Image (cartoon, rainbow, N blue to C red):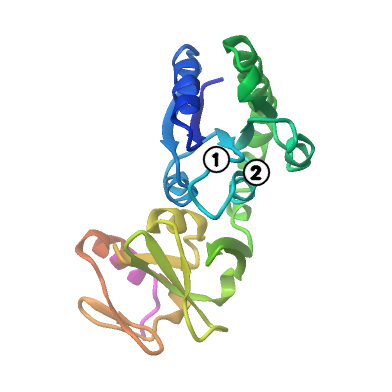
């Protein structure tokens, strides 16, 4: 099974060794090497990473390796890297696939570890195919989790009004909060997490809940308290939505 992987570790000698090991394994593709969890998380939302090698002690951020692993999807498997075995029990309680010591690292040990990952993904493939075939629309949960101010917030999908891009962040406007939720992720990631039956991207900077639209102009739509532009790239998609409306 082919796997995309990434490394989060601030020690360059460790990352160079792992990069060398990965280059020797034909079924592994290295998608990124990171020192900062914040940057790693941003790009994780944009790329499908199957396997993450995460350093526990060495990160250049207030979010440590174990906390970072909790923000990853359950479909991403984690192999922790440490200088000692003091964190091993806690890491395995987080359902880690393996725990590697930098003091006792060889290509053979590394290869055994990634083989374990390959076996795990091979066992999941039939289950994933069955789930995809049986329920397409049910893939979207009623609640999504987003990271904001070093906290994980659970946001009910029915409460989301619209989403606005803000550089590397998004602002999530909801019915029940006066201020928007600021989260480090991309619009592409958010668009993939929201059901197309309820949400529509109308601009590179805006995703809206369809039922919140109050008026429609030539190049704009108005929500309860805000007018938003319709971008050229998304105009045909928006027209397709309009064609389904019953206008009296």
Determine whether, in the image, residue 221 is placed left or right of residue 42.
left
Where is mark 2, residue-wise? 74
Q: Residues in magenta? A: 239-248
Mark-to-mark CA distance, 2 and 1: 23 Å
Residue at 48% of width from left, 82% of height from top?
179
Q: Where is residue 16 in the image (x, y as percent from the top left)?
A: 44, 23
Tell me if residue 242 is in the magenta stretch: yes
Foreground residue among 129 and 121:
121
> Vertical placement of 75 versus 194: above or below?
above
Can you name the residue that lies furthest to the bottom here?
Answer: 225
Left/right of residue 210 with respect to residue 139 in the rendered view:
left
Of the pair 100 and 93, the residue shown nearer to us: 100
Question: Would residue 118 be visible to someone looking at this image?
Answer: no
Residue 58 circle label: 1
**Residue, x 45% and y 24% (percent of image)?**
29
Quarter the C terminus occupies: bottom left
> For numbered disc 1, what is the local secondary structure?
loop
Q: Where is residue 158 in the image (x, y as percent from the top left)?
A: 58, 74
Which badge, 2 or 1, is on the more N-terminal residue?
1
């Amino acid at each position: 099974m082919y796997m995309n992987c990434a490394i989060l570790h601030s020690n360059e000698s460790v990352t160079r060794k792992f990069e060398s090991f990965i280059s020797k394994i034909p079924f592994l593709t290295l998608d990124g090497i990171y020192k900062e969890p914040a940057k790693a998380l941003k790009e994780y939302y944009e790329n499908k990473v199957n396997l993450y090698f995460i350093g526990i002690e060495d990160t250049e951020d207030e979010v440590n390796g174990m906390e970072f692993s909790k923000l990853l999807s359950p479909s991403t498997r984690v192999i922790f890297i440490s200088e000692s075995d003091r964190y091993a029990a806690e890491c395995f309680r987080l359902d880690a696939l393996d725990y590697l010591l930098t003091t006792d690292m060889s290509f053979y040990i590394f290869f055994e570890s990634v083989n374990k990952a390959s076996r795990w993904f091979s066992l999941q493939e039939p289950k994933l195919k069955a789930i995809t075939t049986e329920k397409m629309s049910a893939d979207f949960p009623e609640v999504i989790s987003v990271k904001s101010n070093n906290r994980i917030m659970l946001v009910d999908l029915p409460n989301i009004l619209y989403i606005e891009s803000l550089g590397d962040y998004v602002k999530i406007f909801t019915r029940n909060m006066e201020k928007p939720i600021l989260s480090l992720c991309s619009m592409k990631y958010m668009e993939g997490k929201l059901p197309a039956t309820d949400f529509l991207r109308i601009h590179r900077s805006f995703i809206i809940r369809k039922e919140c639209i109050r008026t429609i102009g030539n190049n704009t739509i108005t929500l309860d308290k805000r007018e938003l532009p319709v971008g050229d790239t998304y105009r045909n998609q928006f027209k397709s939505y309009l064609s389904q409306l019953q206008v009296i």
